[in-house]
Image (cartoon, helix red, strand yellow):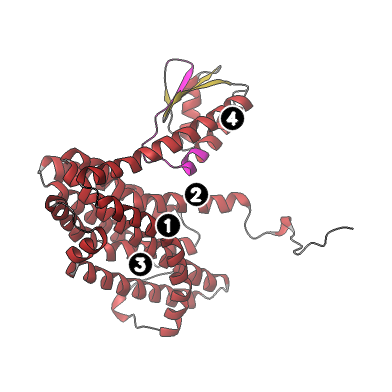
């Protein structure tokens, strides 16, 4: 007896093929990773200032990650509502929805910022209990500037969502990459050049997020876009539309925040064990990622070596790996660079892999896909 198909889908009559979907999806994944990347970079660079500094930043960063997830969920609601109107060819409705998204996200973010600024010390004391005074002072300082960045982060997330609803996910990703470079440079100047310590890291993050918001909204004000957001002073609340946005964003925000709530609970427990434990846990989070992704990278390189006529053997440990090849690795790396993948060489027959500590499995998958494609050209 044959099974009855629930859906009869004509694969030759799809609105979007897999290639188009991946072209849209990959920049979104990278952008979301980069939104959390700033806090991780701050933690890594602040580690040079001592255990009190890294402990303070780590405590606040666990709260900030929760806020990032909340704003990302709000952005999801924004993208769905705007995409709905675009799908109906209702440009006026899409523009109206986008303006309501900006208003809603801005109001929520400002409220959260005010609460964070006024009650930052009580909030940190309630979540993490009694920690050393130096740790709490660093945490309060870092929380002050990062709380000021919430409206800019929220508006950037909303603006990125509006771009994605128009089918352009690459532009927000590029803005995120530039802002992260600004953050790293600012950290180096303010923390080590001007000796501003934790405040320097936080100010650099604030400036980077202001940059993101300003650039994305300048782009959204250009008339050539499908959705244009400008003349902000004329925006008035449409509570029915706002309710639709919140109906999608709030449940998504709760779902996305559950994992961060769990991490926050663990951080709260660790904070009772002293400064050394907090600092150790902060660095362990980074090293845990290195161990997990390092094993995943090794597995992917083994798969590439097994399925390629050019690649002979993968070797190495952690995130320091090499792939021996029978073809000129200089030419392989050049071909890979043309496709957006930067590789290094070790000698004349080995490709060297030394990715950043914050690399994710998604990045390894992208690398493996491009490298496999390149190696086939040399078979």
- The tag earlier along the polypeptide, 2 or 4, is 2
Secondary structure under the numbered disc 4 in the rendered image: helix
Q: Nearer the viewer, residue 319 or 128?
A: 128
- Say whether disc 3 or disc 2 marks the residue closer to the N-terminus: 2
The answer to whether one can see residue 205 in this image is yes
* SS category of the residue bearing label 2: helix
Which residue lies at the image location 59% right of the left edge and 21% below the top edge?
310
Q: Nearer the viewer, mark 3 or mark 1?
A: 1
Q: Which mark is residue 303?
A: 4
> Which residue is pictured at 22% across the width and 59% down the height?
129
Marks 3 and 4, Cα distance to the nearest angstrom? 47 Å
- Gap between marks 2 and 4 measured at Cα: 22 Å
In the drawing, what numbered circle is on residue 26?
A: 2
- Residue at image mark 1: 259
How busy is the neighbourhood of tag 2: few (under 14 within 10 Å), some, or many (20 plus)?
some
The image's mark for residue 221 is 3
Image quadrant of residue 219? bottom left
Q: Nearer the viewer, mark 3 or mark 4?
A: 4
Counting residues from the start of the chain, the first of labels 1 and 2 encountered is 2
Determine whether 89 is above or below 179 in the image: below
């Amino acid at each position: 007896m044959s099974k009855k198909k629930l859906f009869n889908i004509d694969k030759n009559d799809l609105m979007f093929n897999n290639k188009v979907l991946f072209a849209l999806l990959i920049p979104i994944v990278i952008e979301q990773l980069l939104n959390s990347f700033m806090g991780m970079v701050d933690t890594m660079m602040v580690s040079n200032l001592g255990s009190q500094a890294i402990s303070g930043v780590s405590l606040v960063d666990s709260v900030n990650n929760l806020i990032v997830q909340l704003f990302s969920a709000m952005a999801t609601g924004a993208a769905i509502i705007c995409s709905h109107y675009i799908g109906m060819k209702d440009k006026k409705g899409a523009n109206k929805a986008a303006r309501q998204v900006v208003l809603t996200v801005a109001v929520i973010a400002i409220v959260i910022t005010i609460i964070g600024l006024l009650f930052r010390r009580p909030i940190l004391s309630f979540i993490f209990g009694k920690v050393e005074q130096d740790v709490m002072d660093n945490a309060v300082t870092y929380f002050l500037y990062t709380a000021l960045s919430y409206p800019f982060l929220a508006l950037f997330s909303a603006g990125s969502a509006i771009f994605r609803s128009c089918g352009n996910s690459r532009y927000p990703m590029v803005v995120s990459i530039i802002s992260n470079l600004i953050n790293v440079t600012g950290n180096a100047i303010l923390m080590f050049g001007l000796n501003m310590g934790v405040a320097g890291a936080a100010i650099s993050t604030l400036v980077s997020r202001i940059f993101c918001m300003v650039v994305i909204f300048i782009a959204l004000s250009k008339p050539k876009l499908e959705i244009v957001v400008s003349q902000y002073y004329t925006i008035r609340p449409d509570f029915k539309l706002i309710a639709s946005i919140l109906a999608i964003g709030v449940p998504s925000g709760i779902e996305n925040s559950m994992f961060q709530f769990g991490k926050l609970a663990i951080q709260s427990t660790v904070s009772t064990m002293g400064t050394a434990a907090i600092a150790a846990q902060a660095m362990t989070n980074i090293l845990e990622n290195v161990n997990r992704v390092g094993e995943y990278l090794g597995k992917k390189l083994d798969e590439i070596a097994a399925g390629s006529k050019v690649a002979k053997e993968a070797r190495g440990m952690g995130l320091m790996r090499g792939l021996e090849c029978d073809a000129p690795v200089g030419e392989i790396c050049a071909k890979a660079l043309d496709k957006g993948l930067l590789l290094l060489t070790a000698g004349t027959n080995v490709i060297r892999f030394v990715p950043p500590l914050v690399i994710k499995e998604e990045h390894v998958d992208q690398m493996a896909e491009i490298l496999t494609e390149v190696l086939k050209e040399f078979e």
